[in-house]
């Protein structure tokens, strides 16, 4: 009888252990860095969304705030998810948006994901044609500057025609260079204009031609 009792305890323990492993939680954690100032990205809101396979919408499953070391951490159920979406936001910084696939996560250890974001800055591209003619064409092309963001200025060659006295604002990573190459068609007036755009502020690049 005692042997049977021990046997039943072992079986129950094994079954219980299997169930626990099947529903084990994921732990997702890491450090977010302020790339502009090479410091921890502190007091930033961090959100975690879950997308279940076969569904088009995502559900918020976690929210936290980075600590004084820029650390964040989430522990969440191991559901039949397709992917997770992590986002972080803070005033005057570019939003952080990252997709994490279910297949890339493990329950065996903490899932470490470290990220970097940067401060916002703006550049005012000021153009002024001193002696305008209807046939004047100025072309300029960005060479250095923020790309691939929803508020970034367009890539490729840009044209300004005739009488020009205008300003165009572009977003940039704080404390980095914004540079463009320009040429006035039909003349020898061409060159490069650049400036370091100050974090949280607007820096002007003025071209008079």
Image (spheres, grey):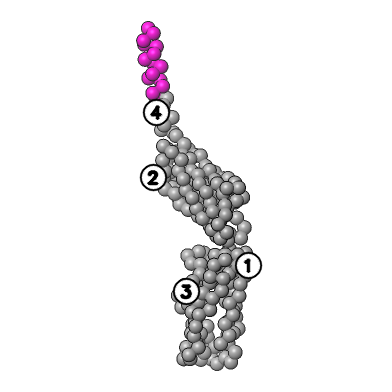
Residue 126 quadrant = bottom right
Q: Earlier in the sequence, mark 1 or mark 4?
A: 4
Disc 1 from disc 4: Cα separation: 56 Å
Query: Residue at position x 57%, y 91% from top?
Result: 132
Q: Picture coordinates of residue 149 (x, y %)?
A: 50, 64
Q: Position of residue 13 (x, y in %)?
A: 41, 21
Q: Are marks 1 and 3 in contact (CB under 8 Å)?
A: no
Disc with the residue nearer the chain's start (1 vs 3) = 3
Do tag 1 and tag 2 residues touch (Cβ < 8 Å)?
A: no
Q: Quadrant of the N terminus?
A: top left
**Marks 1 and 3, Cα distance to the nearest angstrom?**
21 Å
Q: Which residue is mark 3?
A: 143
Q: CA distance from mark 1 to mark 2?
A: 41 Å
x, y percent for residue 74 = 52, 42
Pointer 2: what residue? 103
Image point 50% across, 44% down: which residue?
Answer: 29
Q: Main secondary structure of the magenta part?
A: helix
Q: Which residue is mark 4?
A: 18
SS at mark 2 in the image: helix
Range of magenta residues = 1-15
How many residues crowd mark 2 within 10 Å: few (<14), some (14–19), many (20+)?
few
Label 4 Cα crowd, 10 Å radius (few <14 / some 14-19 / many 20+):
few
**Residue identified by numbered label 1:** 201
Say what secondary structure mark 1 lies in. Answer: loop
């Amino acid at each position: 009888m005692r042997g049977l009792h021990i046997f039943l305890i072992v079986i129950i323990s094994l079954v219980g252990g299997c169930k626990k492993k099947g529903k084990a939680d994921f732990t997702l954690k890491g450090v977010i860095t302020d790339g502009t100032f090479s410091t921890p990205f502190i007091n930033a809101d961090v959100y975690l969304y879950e997308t279940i396979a076969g569904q088009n919408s995502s559900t918020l499953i976690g929210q936290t705030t980075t600590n004084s070391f820029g650390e964040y951490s989430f522990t969440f159920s191991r559901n039949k998810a397709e992917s997770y979406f992590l986002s972080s936001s803070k005033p005057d910084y570019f939003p952080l948006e990252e997709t994490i696939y279910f297949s890339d996560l493990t329950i065996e250890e903490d899932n470490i994901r470290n990220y970097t974001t940067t401060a916002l800055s703006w550049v005012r591209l000021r153009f002024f044609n001193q002696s305008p003619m209807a046939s004047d064409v100025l072309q300029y092309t960005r060479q250095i500057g923020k790309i691939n963001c929803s508020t970034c200025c367009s890539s490729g060659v840009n044209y300004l025609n005739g009488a020009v006295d205008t300003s165009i604002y572009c977003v940039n990573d704080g404390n980095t260079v914004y540079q463009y190459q320009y040429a006035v068609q039909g003349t020898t007036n061409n060159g490069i204009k650049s400036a370091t755009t100050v974090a949280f502020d607007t820096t002007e690049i003025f071209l008079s031609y």
